[in-house]
């Protein structure tokens, strides 16, 4: 019998989950029998080889989304999971897949039985890493397919006969037809588990046609899981088309509604670029050694800010895979203090222990604001977010004020006063593009090199 982290203290009694999970409100909707959640490790009935790595990880309790997803998926249900970033969604879908593969009669040396689609290569690699870390004991092999890197080595990985394929929609779609000169194509005809991770982001990035094409080639007899941070009409349509009688699990407020209350949010009014730079330097000086992510809207700005910021690297859609891995690796290890990023490059990354987020350019959409600010204040730690606003950023300013109000926080006096005075404008100098702009667009800021991502990441 394995020792579970909470075995000693609980002595077999039913105990409410520890930590954040206890405070998250969960709403479950669905028809048909709905299994009870697995609220603590004792109730988690995965096979020992799937449970073992969880024990080693020493997590205090399953997160809210895991408590509900694990029994539902184990019971074979299709599932829609709506939960914020950092809530443990990756293991929420991976472990039931592993458990079911072990217990089924699937030929584990056959073609991939599980497919995870993710919006960006970073995210795909991160899922693959988590799959390897938590699936190795169970003999699970994973391969990763993403754009922006040569196809050959990725196809070679397929010869290791992975059961799990993690892919960005663009690259997988390309590989479903054998590339010229390569005799192998990716075989998805045996996929019985399909996961759409960060589905809303994939649609934002324009991947819907590729996703639909990929799913059309999968067996109808399969379990389908969709995770999303938001719940717009386009996502509901996708769910209606591809999921069968899904259970809907909503853990906490949808992401776009509020910011983690552990993050202190500031707005800083800047007169011009020079002013922004001075403010940035001051923030970096005053935050000592704390790790920091600086968000910008364009690739050009990303390079500019990184060039003048010591111990920093830039990640955006034009960086090749090696550069992005290097920057991310250095940052995660703590050997580099500051990461300068566009939304595309940073979305969904699991970066721990960032104390400071600076929105050097204000985000274009409310959900980007929430995602950016959500890079800090993770796992109960305190964080600080600074958003630089100029008089051109009226849209973003109004949205931030709305977020404060929604969270019942005091709107900063200067923000309120500037909005009331009418001196803030939206739309300053932007050549607006229609692409990937949702209804919650926050302001202007689209630029020639606005990092919209799909074409770089697929
Ligand atoms: P999401 O996909 O919801 O943004 P991730 O799956 O990337 O979140 O998980 C974020 C981090 O939390 C990862 O480092 C993961 O290993 C960790 N984690 C997963 N499950 C738990 C748990 N039950 N308790 C604590 N940490 C967990
Ligand atoms: Mg995730």
Image (cartoon, rainbow, N blue to C red):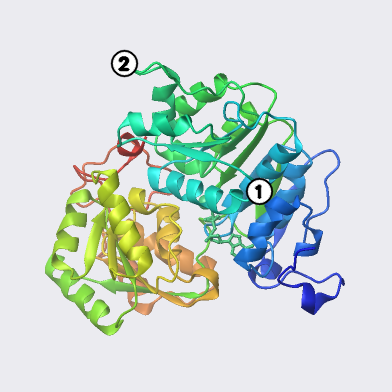
Find residue 389 and report its image quarter.
bottom left
Q: Nearer the viewer, residue 350 or 389?
A: 350
Tell me which residue sits at (43%, 64%) in the image: 375
Left or right, 37 with respect to 402, comes to right
- The correct choice, above or below, for 75 with respect to 254 in the image is above
Q: Nearer the viewer, residue 25 or 419?
A: 25
Left or right, 362 with respect to 32, comes to left
Q: Nearer the viewer, mark 2 or mark 1?
A: 2
Which residue corresponds to mark 1?
95
- Label 1 residue SS: helix
Q: Is residue 391 visible?
A: no
Q: Is residue 128 visible?
A: yes
Tell me which residue sits at (57%, 51%) in the image: 90
Left or right, 67 with respect to 323, comes to right
- The correct choice, above or below, for 403 with respect to 284 in the image is above
Looking at mark 1, is its residue's CB closer than 8 Å to ligand 1?
A: no
Which residue corresponds to mark 2?
181
The numbered mark at residue 307 is: none
- The correct choice, above or below, for 426 with respect to 198 in the image is below
């Amino acid at each position: 019998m394995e020792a579970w982290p909470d075995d000693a203290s609980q002595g077999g009694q039913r105990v409410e989950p520890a930590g954040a999970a206890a405070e998250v409100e969960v709403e479950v909707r669905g028809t048909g029998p709905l299994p009870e959640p697995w609220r603590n490790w004792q109730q988690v009935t995965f096979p020992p080889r799937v449970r073992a790595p969880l024990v080693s990880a020493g997590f205090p309790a399953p997160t809210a989304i895991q408590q509900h997803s694990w029994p539902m998926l184990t019971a074979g249900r299709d599932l829609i999971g709506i939960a914020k970033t950092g809530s443990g969604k990756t293991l929420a879908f991976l472990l039931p897949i592993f458990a079911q593969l072990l217990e089924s009669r699937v030929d584990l040396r056959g073609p991939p039985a599980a497919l995870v689609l993710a919006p960006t290569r970073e995210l795909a690699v991160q899922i693959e890493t988590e799959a390897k870390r938590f699936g190795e004991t169970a003999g699970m092999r994973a391969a990763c397919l993403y754009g922006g890197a040569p196809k050959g080595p990725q196809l070679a990985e397929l010869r290791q006969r992975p059961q799990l394929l993690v892919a960005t929609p663009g690259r997988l779609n390309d590989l479903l037809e054998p590339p010229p000169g390569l005799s192998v194509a990716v075989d998805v005809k045996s996929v019985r588990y399909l996961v759409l991770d960060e589905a809303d982001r994939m649609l934002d990035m324009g991947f819907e046609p590729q996703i639909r094409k990929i799913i059309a080639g999968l067996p109808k007899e399969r379990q389908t899981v969709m995770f999303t941070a938001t719940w717009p009409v386009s996502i509901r349509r996708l769910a209606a088309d591809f999921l069968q009688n899904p259970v809907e699990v909503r853990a906490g407020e949808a992401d776009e509604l509020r910011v983690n209350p552990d993050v202190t949010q500031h707005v800083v009014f800047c007169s011009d670029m020079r002013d922004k730079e001075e403010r940035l330097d001051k923030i970096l000086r005053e935050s000592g050694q704390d790790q920091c992510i600086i968000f910008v809207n364009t690739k050009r700005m990303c390079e500019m800010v990184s060039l003048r910021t010591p111990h920093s690297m830039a990640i955006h859609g034009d960086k090749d895979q090696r550069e992005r891995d290097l920057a991310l690796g250095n940052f995660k290890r703590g050997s580099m203090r500051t990461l300068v990023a566009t939304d595309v490059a940073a979305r969904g990354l699991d970066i721990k222990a960032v104390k400071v987020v600076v929105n050097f350019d204000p985000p274009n959409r409310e959900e980007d604001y929430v995602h950016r600010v959500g890079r800090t204040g993770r796992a109960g730690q305190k964080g600080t977010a600074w958003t630089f606003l100029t008089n051109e950023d009226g849209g973003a300013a109004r949205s931030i004020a709305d977020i404060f109000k929604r969270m019942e926080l005091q709107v900063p006096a200067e923000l309120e006063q500037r909005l009331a005075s009418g001196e803030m404008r939206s739309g300053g100098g932007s050549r607006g593009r229609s692409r990937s702009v949702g209804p919650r667009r926050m302001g202007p800021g689209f630029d020639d090199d606005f990092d919209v991502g799909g074409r770089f990441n697929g």
